[in-house]
Image (cartoon, coloured by chain):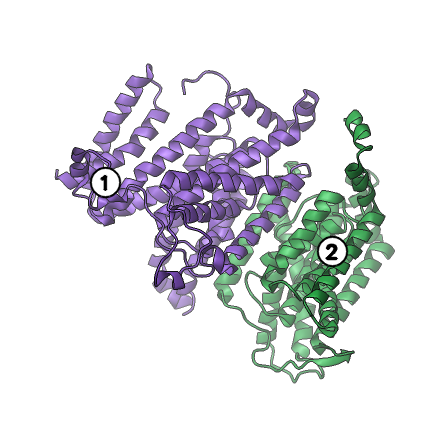
Amino acid sequence: MTALHLAKAALLAVPLWLLLSSLLRLKPSWLKHLASLAVGFGAAALVTLVTPTGILSYLTTFILMACIYAVLSVGLNVQWGYTGLFNIGVAAFYAIGAFTSALVTTRMPTGLNASFTKQLFGLGMPFWVGVLAAGLVAGLLAWLVGKPTLRLRGDYLAIATIGIAELVRLFFQNERWLANGPQPLRGIPQPLSCLTGDGCAWLPGFVNSFFAPLGPRDYPFVYIAIVALVLYLVYRVLERAIRSPWGRVLRAVREEEASAAMNGKDIAAFRMQAFVVGSVIMGIGGALYAHYIVSIDYSHFDPLNGTFLVWVMLMLGGSGNNRGAILGAFVVYAIWSGTSFVVDALRPTLAAISPELPSRGPYLRLLFISILLVFIVLYRPRGIVPEEKVVSLDRDL
Amino acid sequence: MLQRSAAAAERPFERFRRVASGKAGMLLALALVLLAIIVTAALKGVPATQLLSLFVRGVLLGGMLALGAVGVTLVYAVLKMANFAHGDTMTLGAYLGLVVVTLLPKGAPIAPFSFGYEFIVALLVVIPAVGLIAFGLDQLAFRPLRARRSQSVMFAMAALGLAFGIRSLVYIFWGADFTFFYTGRARPAVELFAGVRVRPDQLFILGLAVALIAGVYLLLERTKIGKAMRATADNSDLARISGIDTKRVILWTWLIGGGLAGAGGMLYGLDVQLRPEMGWWLLLPLFASVILGSLGNAYGALAGAFVIGIVWQMSGAFINPVYSQGIAFLVMIVVLLVRPEGLFGGRR
């Protein structure tokens, strides 16, 4: 086991620790965390040792993207799963979060760069400020969209969110002054990237020297720990909220609007809260994506990648269940990435059918995912992990 | 609630809102929107001729939108579902038309139009074909949901799956690039009146759209199945008790809605271009038209489509045309704020 293995294993232990501690039922909680940390590190070390470097890197980026999608899926779960709000414009909040965080954390381009990159502002703030700003702006957008539509039938919200997603994308595509328009906005800073470089000045020396073997190409290992932490925090906060009186009202609004109103609950206010909270989470997801991918443009936030996949994830995993939402994100992202290998393998066969077909392979995946969604709606509308009937019992969170 | 509205009636804003949300108020608001567009355009120095020709083009676009919007609203009226696959049904119609046009031997263009007999044949094939496909998809995806009495959002979700499924098929068979029914054929514009120039094709499009919609009007008002459809839309339970064959009504709803969508897609393809995303982009203006004219009201959808078409084109005089979707969206949001039941709906 080299120092590089050790550094990677330590970073991979973070998502495993968080996963295990959410699954284990053990008291007291310090023991649970200790146990899952130990098991997590052991498992991470084993995986790091036995898996070839290339596959390990692929696995890491896969889990990373799945975690980002899980944030989106959990956000949508607040809206659709718990409150029954039909938002088909996830991409709008995802995109606005990504661009907000990018603008807040990058610096205004100077010198030669300024003629290539146009942006409204660049504050050069730290990562966490960007993430918070992303959530804030996405929440504000949700409030604006929700105001006229939330008091009406669900279909109206659906069409309005389709519209806002298209408009946000068009806006970022055409307004160069805002975020470099059709050109990608580059150079979005990566948090803790100093760990994979010359070391971070503010960290004690032994930490820096522990992570010193990591090169810039190993950055996903660092980021996976950050994304997993954010996902875990979002998950914990939501689980608390859903098991609180607030969460019960949301479900009451979804199931029996009239009787919730009769019990003195302000339906419109609760709908708005759920819509805004869900959108804030989606905005945070967008920020996480932007800092991972470093260079973003409008095309990343099309209806397919930004909205449709997230819906299939939530529906497959189980609407109304945060664990289901996260599981769904992993399963569907696995299907999505896995089918790309299948299509690659089928390339010769496709070429034999028609010379143009291999280049259109990606659309076979889209067809498959679309059929999958219709099948879920028809045959498994409750998903893999159905909603729990009783959620308010103490279950040792 | 009662107390609140009584108190609110005193306030000037609420009073304004009450007046504005009446039918007359809505019509006034639409007139004001048109006036605002004309004034803004005049201030920006847009010549009157250009404004007039944009108006004419808006009417043309409205005709195409109407073909889609009538289908959306009929499906909503009879089946109580928002069909988000309708835009992509239009795309499917356009591309199926392309297949027929390509397969048939090319005839000479029928002067003064740019297309030959094969386009007419394609229309005759596509209208029933897309109608039947729409019905088939309904039987596959929506009928089981109806049998289970699923929530309305489940229908919308299934429709979303179908929409992306249809689009992916279009991508697979025809690729992601835009295309035309006739590549490289000149489509000269002629002067209609007062410097307004249109292509003869566009007059054909408007004529056909009006004819098709008149046909639907006759079908709804004068035939037995039309009467049955209207009865089902009014009250489906009562209709069933009265011995109306709901299955037949559903079949005809999809035949009409799908057929019109297919024709609308072909006409849009003839006028602009064929693109796999065209239907998805049309979805927003379609629903804006339908909501403006009250969901479920066929004649309202018609009026809504023309309003949206005209506002869309005329606003292009002074804002970047890429945001024309945004104008449709804005009109929709204003309607939702002021009078969500639309121009022709009763009070909730």
Question: Which residue was labeled with disc 1?
Answer: A200
**Picture coordinates of residue A278, whole percent (x, y):** 52, 36
What type is the residue that disc 2 sits on?
Val
Q: Residue pushed farthest right?
A: B222
> Relative to the observer, which residue lies in front, A258 or A264?
A264
- Whether marks 1 and 2 lie on the same chain: no
**Picture coordinates of residue A186, whole percent (x, y):** 37, 55
> Relative to the observer, which residue lies in front, A265 or A391?
A265
Taking the image as shown, residue B176 lies to the left or right of residue A291, namely right
* Mark sitting on residue A150: none
- Which quadrant does the N terminus of chain B fall into? top right
Q: Colour of chain B?
A: green
Whole-Å distance between the Cαs marked 1 and 2?
Answer: 63 Å
**Quadrant assignment, res A114:** bottom left
> Relative to the observer, which residue lies in front, A7 or B273?
A7
Name the mark nearer the viewer: 1 or 2.
1
Residue located at (87% from left, 56% from top): B222
Taking the image as shown, residue A312 lies to the left or right of residue B148, namely left
Tag count: 2
Chain that is coloured purple in the picture: A
The answer to whether residue B134 is seen in the rendering is no
Secondary structure state at the residue bearing disc 2: helix
Q: Disc 1 sits on a residue from what chain? A: A
Q: Is residue B76 above or below residue A44?
A: below
